[in-house]
Image (tube, rainbow, N blue to C red):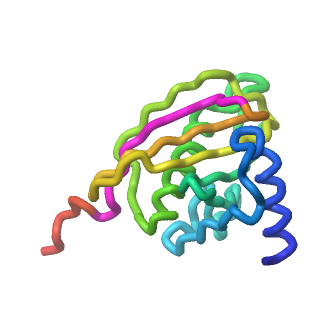
Amino acid sequence: MSYNQKLEKELLLNRLNLVLPDVKLDEIRTVDKRFSHQNCMLCGTQALLGLNLHFYSTPDQQVWARARGTIHQQGYQGILHGGFLSALLDSGMCQALFKQNIEAVTADMNIRYLHEVPVDSQILIKGKIISARAPLYKVEGELYVQGNLMVKSTARFMKKGFGKKAAC
């Protein structure tokens, strides 16, 4: 493991312990990056202006990442835009599926904004699969700031490519 990976895991653990106090550093596993997501604006490694989020799993099969909003994702003065927060949730839920080797796309998503999220907040992203009945998957996402749940969502994902018409 590289120094940067270890540092990233330690930074994540500091925030994660506010939500899951019993998780230890050696229990956190890297969620592998997907080739199909190289250009994703949130988790991709090739997206020029992307966030390049790194996701990690815990023993309870949840995935976690850390992010920081900036003035570039602002909606109202000093508050992160709801669309940006929605994108973070979607990314976390998608990564929970990737962790189980499932590639799926968002079919629908329900979001509950509990609190405003200030610009420059240190955000903890969570994704977790609730049910898996291929080709449909129900997933939940949550965003935390300083251990407080700020935004939560549930979504249904459809297996990627399901329902495509066959080429003539």
The vertical placement of 36 against 50, above or below, is below
Q: Specify the quadrant that holds the N terminus.
A: bottom right
The residue at the point 66 percent across, 67 percent down is: 30
Q: Specify the quadrant that holds the C terminus.
A: bottom left
Which quadrant would residue 85 be assigned to in this image? top right
Q: Nearer the viewer, residue 29 or 55?
A: 29
Furthest toward the left, the residue is 168
The overriding secondary structure of the stretch rendered in magenta is strand
Furthest toward the front, the residue is 22
The residue at the point 52 percent across, 26 percent down is: 112
Percent coordinates x, y for residue 145 in the rendering: 74, 34
Which quadrant would residue 105 be assigned to in this image? bottom left
Does 17 sit left or right of 7 as displayed? left
Q: Can residue 72 be seen in this view?
A: no
Percent coordinates x, y for residue 156 in the rendering: 36, 44
Which quadrant would residue 89 be assigned to in this image? top right
Percent coordinates x, y for residue 15 in the rendering: 78, 45
The residue at the point 62 percent across, 55 percent down is: 42
The vertical placement of 30 against 118, above or below, is below
Q: Nearer the viewer, residue 19 or 140?
A: 19
Q: Is residue 162 visible?
A: yes
Percent coordinates x, y for residue 7 in the rendering: 85, 63
The stretch in magenta equals: 148-161
The residue at the point 68 percent across, 52 percent down is: 65
Q: Does the magenta stretch include residue 150?
A: yes
The vertical placement of 131 against 31, above or below, is above
Total marks drawn? 0
Q: Is residue 163 magenta?
A: no
